[in-house]
Image (cartoon, rainbow, N blue to C red):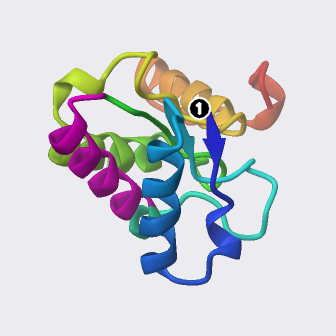
């Protein structure tokens, strides 16, 4: 696994280059960041990384995993990332060997959404185990 630290790379071109270098060096998984930096996963840098994964796969035949870390805190945000992965890499990447979502704060929103779906209203924080 290679962690790019996309916030320190400054440009999307550098994100693309770093993604390719990591894959060419043998990384089987590339991750946007540790999730603790000021700039974490967003749709722009993730799109670039996913396109580099696709290009590397088309060139080498090797599937590389992807993990957007940090910056994903809502169920709706996860859906945006899943759509991005589906559009760029296809359904084959929808397995834990190739796709992981790094967002511990996301669990709270998923719990909120499930509560709303079941009861028709959002819960207060004292009613949620994860909050």
- Number of numbered discs: 1
Q: Is residue 60 magenta?
A: yes
- The part of the chain drawn in magenta is 46-62
Residue depicted at x 16% and y 46%:
87
Q: Main secondary structure of the magenta part?
A: helix
For the question of whether residue 86 can be seen, the reply is no
Give the secondary structure at mark 1. helix
The picture places residue 62, in percent across and down from the top left corner, at: 29, 28
Q: Is residue 4 above or below residue 56?
A: below
Q: Is residue 80 above or below residue 125?
A: below
Task: Please identify the quadrant where the C terminus is shown.
Answer: top right
Q: Is residue 100 above or below residue 43?
A: above
Residue depicted at x 67% and y 53%:
33
Image-based side of 106 in relation to 27, left or right = right
The picture places residue 68, in percent across and down from the top left corner, at: 53, 46
The picture places residue 126, in percent across and down from the top left corner, at: 84, 29
Residue depicted at x 66% and y 50%:
70
Query: In which quadrant of the rendered view does residue 60 lie?
Result: top left
Q: Is residue 73 magenta?
A: no
Front residue of 83/75: it is 83
The picture places residue 114, in percent across and down from the top left corner, at: 49, 22
For the question of whether residue 35 can be seen, the reply is yes
Q: Is residue 5 above or below residue 114?
A: below
Q: Residues within 10 Å of mark 1 (few under 14, many from 20)?
A: many
Q: Read off the residue under disc 1.
A: 112
Image-based side of 37 in relation to 87, left or right = right
Front residue of 96/28: it is 28
Residue depicted at x 68% and y 60%:
5
Task: Please identify the quadrant where the N terminus is shown.
Answer: top right
């Amino acid at each position: 696994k290679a962690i790019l630290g996309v916030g320190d790379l400054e440009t999307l071109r550098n994100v693309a280059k770093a993604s390719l270098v990591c894959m060419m060096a043998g990384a089987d998984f590339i991750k946007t960041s540790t999730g603790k930096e000021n700039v974490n996963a967003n749709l722009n840098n993730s799109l670039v990384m996913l396109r580099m994964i696709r290009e590397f796969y088309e060139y080498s035949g090797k599937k590389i995993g992807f993990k957007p870390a940090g910056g994903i805190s809502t169920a709706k945000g996860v859906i945006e990332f899943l759509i991005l992965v589906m559009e760029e890499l296809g359904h084959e990447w929808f397995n834990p060997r190739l796709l992981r979502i790094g967002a511990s704060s996301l669990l709270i929103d998923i719990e909120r959404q499930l509560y709303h779906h079941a009861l028709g209203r959002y819960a207060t924080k004292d009613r949620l185990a994860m909050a």
